[in-house]
Amino acid sequence: MTANINLPRILRVGAGASRQLPEVLDELGLKQPLLVTDGFIVSLGWLDDLEAQLSEKGFVHNRFTGVVPDPTTDAIAAGLAVLHLGEHDCVVALGGGSSIDTAKAIAAMAHRDQPMRHYKVPNSIDDGLPVIAIPTTAGTGSEVTRVSVITDTETQEKMLCMGLGLMPVAALVDFELTLSMPWRLTADTGLDSLCHALEAYVSKKANAFTDTIALAAMTAINTHIRTACQEPDNREAREAMMLAATQGGIAFSNASVTLIHGMSRPIGALFHVPHGLSNAMLLPEVTAWSISGAPDRYADCARAMGMADTSDNDDAANKKLVTCLRQLCRDLNVPSPGEFGIDAQVWQQSLELMTQQALDSGSPNNNPRIPNGAEIKDLYQKVWAN
């Protein structure tokens, strides 16, 4: 079977990559970028620095700083209003996954006139303004994916949008931007990356190209995530986590995510749980349930992460995998839904809706063990209990 691999045209990785935006714009023949970010990045002064670089080189530019966590269609509409004030020929994202997904959506919707829900999966968005992504968190991998997740303000559905029009034309991956990431964000985005890599490896759409990248990402994340949290200035750990995040993004964008992400999106949309954290809440339980569908693949993951020995058979390796994933989540203080503050009655009342939205996303169909609605609902119940 032929694997279809999509990547940014330009991918620059390493210290200082974020300062190469003017030359990348020149290389691409782009002249008038709209810069997209959030208020926190503005407060750090990073947007001012980027704009100074552009002004020095004579680029006409404007900014949209209305990015919100878990981007909404209302935020996209506000960004489009700013975009249409000028003759912008590209969109530059500076920030975490929310900023990058917002920039992608603005670029994709620049010349479309229907509500964004018309373009969600299973439809494909295959054109739009060029996007240049400068990630500031080591987690989402959105800088190298043809995916954007946007919450419909009217329906509260967390929509999965896909297509080549959402693939950044360039990504500038600079781990130095992550040295100021706080503990909780480091943990959540790192666990998001781990889910990307693990899900890509066990996905029914896995392929030889993504397998090696996914295993490398898993190895690096389990090796360095605790250090990155505990020693925020540790450059070795930060660099390893940033590269692993990009690798995880490449892996899942070209092999797909599975049941964890399918079940995670409704939790984020309904209860405003940060995306990486909702994935982490699900990671041990969904993995334990899914192992029977691909025990050899999950055992490979356990060995790659050093959670099992090379001498362990698949059954022993998988038992260690689940145990170690539970311990990792404890070490990183991943709360249960109840500990996060979700009301038990509201959770119960939302089970049918969450289950339907998980199924509608299509991601569960890529899982090695494909669930029905009753099984997804039961998994939500187990995640609550644990």
Image (cartoon, helix red, strand yellow):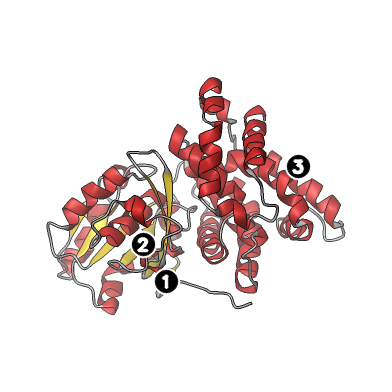
Outermost residue, left direction?
A: 85
> Residue at label 3?
323
Name which residue type carries label 2: Ala
* N-term-proximal mark, 1 vs 3: 1
Q: Nearer the viewer, residue 236 or 328?
A: 328
Q: Residue at x 68, y 40 (%)?
A: 285
**How packed is label 3: few (under 14 Cα within 10 Å), some, or many (20 or more)?**
some
Q: CA distance from mark 1 to mark 2?
A: 10 Å
* N-term-proximal mark, 3 vs 2: 2
Compared to residue 240, the image places residue 346 above or below, namely above
Compared to residue 59, the image places residue 136 above or below, namely above
**How packed is label 1: few (under 14 Cα within 10 Å), some, or many (20 or more)?**
many
Q: Quadrant of the C terminus?
A: top right
Q: Residue at x 72, y 44 (%)?
A: 289
Q: Secondary structure at mark 2?
A: strand
> In screen coordinates, is 31 left or right of 191?
left
Would you say the residues marked 1 and 2 are in contact, meaning their CB atoms lie under 8 Å apart? yes
